[in-house]
Image (tube, grey):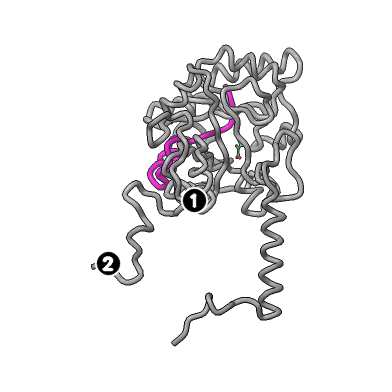
């Protein structure tokens, strides 16, 4: 007999702890007929010219919805600092924050490849620290890969994590954890010297064993050139269309706040819809329209 209050359908054998809105199976995406996107699907997508889709996710409910939509990969980004935790930057985000969010997202995902960001302060000290942080993420979340920022400066860390059997996604261009050096969110790789530096970093990330690299706020021509000479897939955010995939922060993409960066398209206005729903709820409670008979238990 099931223990009281246990709902056997709430946690399925494939570890999906949260049901999506529709419950429909996700469209195929880069995994083709395979149920779960795995690391080799990213490489195959690049070789076949199929675009990779990635959105951020920070909690189980949202992850289940994005997963059901057929998004190939979910990034538990340290943008959780700005989007969910009320910080002005990603710098205060801790490994504990990432582990908690990573576990929620991985538990709610049936299809997507889940990547967890290593936050500022969890890998810069060297390969040993980076490996310990990555191992903790993998052991405690159920994610499939980690992401970290930096090119040549992070190559030894990427190598150490990769050698331990953990896939790594690199992150180049505008790297928010270095915003105090970069002077805020600014396009990186403009001009020949800067583009050359970025290309060297991209090669270093690939040679260190990364399975993919995010290019953030990079001129399209530079991103296109890097995409051309790298063997691993590039995933752009503000890097133009000539990359192997696109990533957006889900709250930007869904219009959760009034402002979105120029490189993000707003596919919905969920912030306004949510505000209206909350206002309707409050009004109906105040005038007695909610709860109605159908929301009420009789003796
Ligand atoms: O943390 C994040 O959301 C990211 C994306 C912007 C790529 O790193």
Q: Label for residue 283?
A: none
Q: Nearer the viewer, mark 2 or mark 1?
A: 1
* Residue 273 on the magenta span: no
Q: Is residue 82 above or below residue 233?
A: below
Image quarter hosting the N terminus: bottom left
Does the Cβ of the disc 2 residue fall within 8 Å of ligand 1? no
- Locate residue 131: give its quadrant: top left
* Nearer to the camera, 239 or 133: 239
- Locate residue 38: give its quadrant: top left
Dots 2, 1 in contact, CB < 8 A: no
Q: Is residue 59 above or below residue 261?
A: below
Residue on which the image places disc 1 = 22
Quarter of the image where ligand 1 sits: top right
* Nearer to the camera, 41 or 102: 41
Please tell me which of labels 2 and 1 falls first in the chain: 2
Q: Position of residue 229 (x, y in %)?
A: 57, 12
Which residue is the extreme one toward the left?
Answer: 1
Q: Position of residue 3 (x, y in %)?
A: 29, 69
Q: Is residue 176 left or right of residue 126?
A: right
Secondary element under disc 2, as helix, strand or loop, is: loop
Which residue is the extreme one toward the front?
Answer: 293
Q: Is residue 258 above or below residue 293?
A: above
Residue 271 seen in the current view:
yes
Span highlighted in magenta in the image: 131-153
Residue 153 seen in the current view:
no
Q: Position of residue 72 (x, y in %)?
A: 49, 34
Residue pictured at 63% horizontal, 41% vertical: 249
Q: Is residue 253 left or right of residue 231?
A: right
Q: Position of residue 152 (x, y in %)?
A: 57, 22
Residue on which the image places disc 2 = 2
């Amino acid at each position: 007999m099931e223990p009281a209050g246990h709902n056997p359908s709430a946690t399925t054998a494939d570890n999906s702890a949260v049901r999506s809105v529709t419950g429909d199976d996700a469209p195929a995406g880069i995994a083709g007929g395979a149920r779960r996107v795995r690391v080799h699907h990213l490489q195959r997508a690049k070789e076949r010219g199929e675009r990779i889709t990635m959105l951020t996710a920070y909690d189980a409910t949202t992850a289940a919805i994005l997963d059901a939509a057929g998004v190939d990969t979910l990034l538990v980004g340290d943008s959780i600092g700005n989007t969910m935790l009320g910080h002005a930057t990603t710098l205060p985000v801790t490994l504990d924050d990432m582990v908690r969010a990573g576990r929620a997202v991985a538990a709610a995902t049936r299809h997507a490849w889940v990547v967890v960001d290593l936050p500022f302060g969890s890998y810069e000290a060297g390969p040993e620290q980076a490996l310990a942080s990555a191992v903790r993420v993998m052991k405690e979340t159920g994610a499939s890969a980690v992401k970290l920022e930096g090119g040549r400066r992070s190559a030894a860390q990427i190598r150490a994590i990769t050698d331990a059997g953990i896939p790594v996604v690199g992150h180049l261009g505008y790297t928010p954890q270095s915003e105090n050096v970069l002077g805020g969110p600014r396009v990186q790789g403009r001009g020949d010297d800067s583009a050359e530096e970025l290309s060297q970093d991209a090669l270093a990330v690939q040679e260190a064993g990364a399975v993919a690299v995010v290019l953030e706020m990079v001129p399209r021509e530079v991103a296109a050139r890097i995409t051309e000479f790298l063997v691993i897939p590039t995933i752009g955010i503000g890097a133009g269309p000539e990359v192997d995939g696109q990533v957006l922060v889900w709250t930007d993409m869904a219009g959760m706040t009034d402002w979105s960066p120029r490189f993000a398209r707003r596919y919905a206005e969920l912030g306004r819809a949510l505000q209206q729903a909350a206002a309707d709820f409050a009004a109906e409670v105040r005038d007695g329209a909610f709860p109605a008979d159908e929301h009420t238990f009789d003796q």
